[in-house]
Image (tube, rainbow, N blue to C red):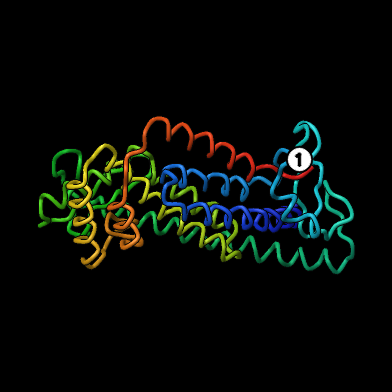
């Protein structure tokens, strides 16, 4: 059972890598709404956890893998769901029968190593969450739903199901105002839970460097999406003030139990902030239709 799971994990990792590289290209389009870009990583996450998807004649995956892969019918009760089999190391499936005993031994050993790596990664994530929770122990209410802590030097959201905003002491009020608006956007979007889920999924594919690259890009896109949410409907003066706040926190020595206001690629974020323009209703509808088409194409498997 573990060996079969590892076989499909490898296939899913290869499929998700192709889809994630496509998302990396799409995120370079600056006019694409940042919230839409971050949502596309949900498609990559599905590819990382589901070995099957629906079949369609327009699947880009069919063009990318026509010479190296084959599809496997997943069978009832999933209708026309199919899996993309990149490895092609088996003669039959459900259960998997490998082409040679040597291949079976290789996958059996790999499955044990994979499971051990997943366990280590999950333990590391749990320890990181526990360290973040410790910052809440000595935090004191600071008003407006925030808590003041001496353990940090930049505002940050801590907690998964009951997230709280921690703020440091001795911060310029104007700079802090923009930082709080950004962190409040994270709370409303439930980004801490999304980050944890993404890290949990990434741990399943710890052996794939692309998975960690995608996780980093996803976290950056969450920051971009919150920047855009704060700036929605605001003018040039507010964009300039927000960029100054980002720069002010970027210069501080970062001590925070998680992604903080001044984190990520700040130079890139400032460039996006200064060039931000609020999209019209028509443009948002067009982007929504485009997003749906892209997501469907990236999810589809070839027949």
Q: Is residue 160 above or below residue 260?
A: above
Q: Secondary structure at mark 1?
A: loop
What residue is disc 1 on? 57
Residue 180 vs residue 86: left or right? left
Residue 112 vs residue 88: left or right? left
Question: In terms of depth relative to the viewer, which is nearer, 175 or 287?
Answer: 287
Question: In terms of depth relative to the viewer, which is nearer, 271 or 81?
Answer: 271
Q: Position of residue 223 (x, y in %)?
A: 35, 51
Q: Position of residue 210 (x, y in %)?
A: 57, 63
Q: Position of residue 201 (x, y in %)?
A: 55, 52
Question: In terms of depth relative to the viewer, which is nearer, 186 or 229?
Answer: 229
For the point 76% across and 45% down, which residue is it? 302
The quadrant the C terminus occupies is top right
Q: Residues within 10 Å of mark 1 (few under 14, many from 20)?
A: few
For the point 45% across and 49% down, which residue is it? 196
For the point 30% across and 56% down, which residue is it? 260
Q: Position of residue 11 (x, y in %)?
A: 71, 56
Residue 137 vs residue 222: left or right? left
In which quarter of the view is residue 268 placed?
Answer: bottom left
In which quarter of the view is residue 152 placed?
Answer: bottom left
């Amino acid at each position: 059972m573990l060996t079969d799971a590892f076989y499909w994990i490898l296939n899913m990792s290869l499929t998700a890598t192709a889809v994630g590289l496509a998302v990396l290209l799409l995120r370079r389009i600056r006019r694409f709404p940042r919230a839409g870009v971050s949502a596309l990583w949900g498609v990559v996450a599905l590819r990382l956890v589901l070995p099957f998807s629906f079949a369609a004649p327009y699947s880009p995956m069919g063009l990318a893998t026509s010479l190296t892969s084959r599809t496997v019918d997943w069978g009832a009760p999933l209708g026309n769901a199919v899996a993309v089999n990149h490895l092609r190391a088996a003669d039959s499936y459900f259960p998997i029968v490998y082409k040679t005993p040597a291949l079976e031994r290789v996958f059996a050993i790999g499955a044990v190593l994979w499971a051990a790596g997943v366990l280590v990664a999950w333990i590391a994530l749990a320890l990181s969450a526990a360290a973040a929770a410790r910052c809440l122990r000595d935090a004191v209410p600071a008003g407006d739903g925030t808590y003041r802590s001496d353990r940090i030097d930049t505002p940050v959201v801590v907690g998964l199901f009951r997230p709280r905003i921690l703020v440091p002491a001795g911060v310029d009020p104007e700079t802090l105002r923009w930082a709080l608006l950004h962190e409040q956007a994270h709370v409303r979007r439930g980004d801490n839970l999304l980050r944890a889920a993404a890290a949990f999924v990434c741990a399943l594919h710890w052996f794939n460097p692309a998975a960690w690259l995608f996780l980093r890009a996803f976290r950056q896109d969450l920051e971009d999406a919150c920047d855009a949410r704060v700036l929605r409907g605001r003018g040039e003066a507010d964009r300039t003030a927000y960029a100054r706040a980002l720069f002010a926190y970027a210069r501080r020595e970062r001590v925070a139990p998680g992604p903080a206001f001044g984190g990520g690629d700040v130079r890139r974020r400032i460039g996006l902030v200064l060039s931000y323009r609020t999209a019209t209703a028509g443009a948002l509808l067009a982007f929504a239709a485009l997003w749906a088409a892209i997501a469907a194409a990236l999810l589809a498997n070839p027949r």
